[in-house]
Amino acid sequence: MSNNTTFVGALSNGFRLLFANGWSISIQQSQYHHCSVGQTAEVAIFDDKNKCYSYDSSTREILAADDDIALGTCSTGNLNGDDIALIISIVSQRNVSSQVHNQRRSKYNQ
């Protein structure tokens, strides 16, 4: 685990932020993602074991995903800059696990 936050370029119109605590977020924006280019972006959240999480923009909470959700379906689309800034502020904390809401998101309620 690095002691620094790093940016990793992505080939799919975005980038990934790797935080010192081992967590990361992937921010994507293109016509092929769930977003309005220039206005919103699609974000995926991963813990230090690469388990994916989602973000509920109505409650402004990070939700633990069910184990049976496929890696490519854990992203949350159409997030604005305020939502993304909040996600970064939560995920970059050393004790991020205590900030994740325990309510599990069903793959049928995406």
Image (tube, rainbow, N blue to C red):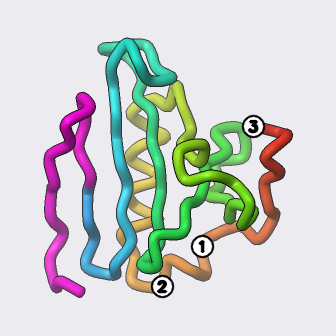
- Residue 29 image position (x, y, % from top left): 33, 25
What secondary structure is found at the residue carrying circle 2? loop
What secondary structure is found at the residue carrying circle 3? loop
In which quarter of the view is residue 39 placed? top left
- Relative vertical location of residue 38 with respect to residue 58 in this rendering, above or below: above
Dot 3 crowding, Cα within 10 Å, few <14, some 14–19, many 20+: few
Residue labelled with disc 2: 95
Q: Earlier in the sequence, mark 3 or mark 1?
A: 1
Residue at 59% x, 48% y is 74
Residue at 59% x, 73% y is 99
- Residue 7 image position (x, y, % from top left): 15, 56
Nearest to the observer: residue 110 or residue 55: 110
Residues under numbered marks 3 and 1 in contact, where contact means CB atoms less than 8 Å apart = no
Residue type of the residue flagged with mark 3: Gln
Quote the CA–CA distance across marks 2 and 3: 27 Å
Residue labelled with disc 3: 110
Nearest to the observer: residue 91 or residue 22: 22
Instruction: Tell me the magenta residue range.
Output: 1-16
**Left or right, 109 with reference to 47:** right
Residue 110 in the magenta stretch? The answer is: no
Quote the CA–CA distance across marks 3 and 1: 21 Å
